[in-house]
Image: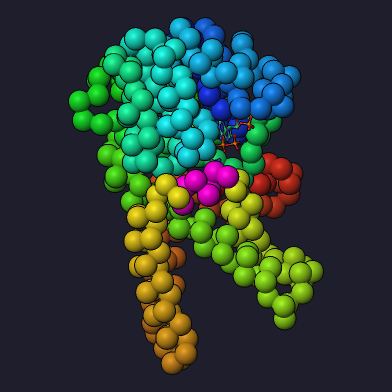
Amino acid sequence: MSEVHFNRVALIGIGLIGSSLAHVMRVKKLADTIAISSRSEKTLKQAEELGLGDSYHTNPADAVKDADYVILCTPVGVVGELTKAIAGSLKKGAILSDVGSVKTSVVRQIRPHLPEGVHLVPAHPVAGTEFSGPDAGFATLFENRWCILTPEPGTDAAAVEAVKRFWEACGSDVEIMSAEHHDLVLAMTSHLPHLIAYNIVGTADDLESVTQSEVIKFSAGGFRDFTRIAASDPTMWRDVFLHNKEAVLETLGRFSEDLSALQRAIRWGDGEALFDLFTRTRAIRRSIIDIGQESDAPNFGRGGVAPRAKAQEPSE
Ligand code: NAP
């Protein structure tokens, strides 16, 4: 892996992802200076107390001055207005990137405000937990996880290479694809599972015949694993669904058809159909373990792990 180093990196937004980047940049010495901006004084103060950066700014335009690498680490719904706010302060030749879980909308929002000579290289680290805020971050979050880059055709090759090397230095494997393809793939692997988790936990909460305490008491029967995903940040996930609408609706349509087929198999006692599907799905889990994206320890390796660490299984 080749060396990568920036003079000044500006992190706009300092929640789970922004603070994890600040930690790993320190550990791996990827920047001389880290400038941090957050919307609220409260979050900014928290970041300062944690010593995440070298300078702290409520105005994002102040943070990006002289930065050679700017990373937007906010919910995806605000990247357009943020780019508009910082555009006049971006240095010529700077790289503008992000970490958003949706890519087509991010490019669409940023592009109209992007100054001439600033290179846009969108990125999505497929790594996370259900925790938010500056105190949730840790340096190893991106290790052995994928980071997907979605530069538009014609983007400066050196800028793409620098972002690629940056994420590799953070411990990630990097893949490059189009924003549209990213959104389709992630609709299936991340967005739909989150929607299902939010829905199943909501349904359990609404069920009047099962008391709240019984849902919690017997949660290890499978429900518990959904509650972890359904505890993910409401603002972030609201924006994901609003900004990846078409791909999520397409995937949801397919899912609903398959669910109806399962419903029919149960109603008509078609055990063969159920057994065939469950055998196929077991093989998919095996292949995820085989490529090192999951532990094969029983019960997700939960036995005896401290509660907070236990919950830091990747959620994206
Ligand atoms: P987070 O912990 O909730 O932090 C969000 C940050 O964005 C905070 O600094 C917050 O500022 C700021 N922010 C929120 N709303 C804003 C607004 N309207 N205008 C300006 N700033 C605003 O979020 P996160 O989990 O790090 O997620 C950040 C991005 O990473 C999202 O785009 C998400 O799609 C992507 N991502 C998340 C995960 C994950 O698992 N969490 C994984 C991969 C990618 P204040 O606190 O000062 O209000």
Q: Vertically, is 16 above or below 203?
A: above
Q: Give the image location of residue 39, x and y in percent.
A: 61, 27
Task: From the viewer's side, name the closer residue of 225 and 304.
Answer: 225
- Is 236 one of the magenta-colored residues? yes
Residue 316's spot in the image, x, y percent?
50, 46
The quadrant of the picture showing ligand 1 is top right
- For this orientation, the residue located farthest to the right is 213
Farthest residue in the left direction? 154
Q: Position of residue 42 (x, y in %)?
A: 72, 27
Q: Residue at x 28, y 38 (%)?
A: 177
Judging depth in this view, the residue of 208 and 61 nearest the camera is 61
Residue 313 can be seen in this image: no
**Rendered residue at 35%/54% (across/down):** 247
Is residue 93 shown in magenta?
A: no
Give the extent of the magenta segment: 235-241
Residue 188, horizontal then vertical, whole percent: 39, 56
Residue at image x 37%, y 74%?
Answer: 257
How many badges with numbers are in the image?
A: 0
Q: Residue at position x 29%, y 30% from top? A: 151
Q: Is residue 284 above or below residue 261?
A: above
Q: Is residue 45 left or right of residue 140?
A: right
Image colouring: rainbow
> Image check: 47 left or right of 260?
right
Residue 245 in sight: yes
User: In terms of image quadrants, where is residue 249?
Assistant: bottom left
As drawn, which residue projects farthest toward the bottom? 268
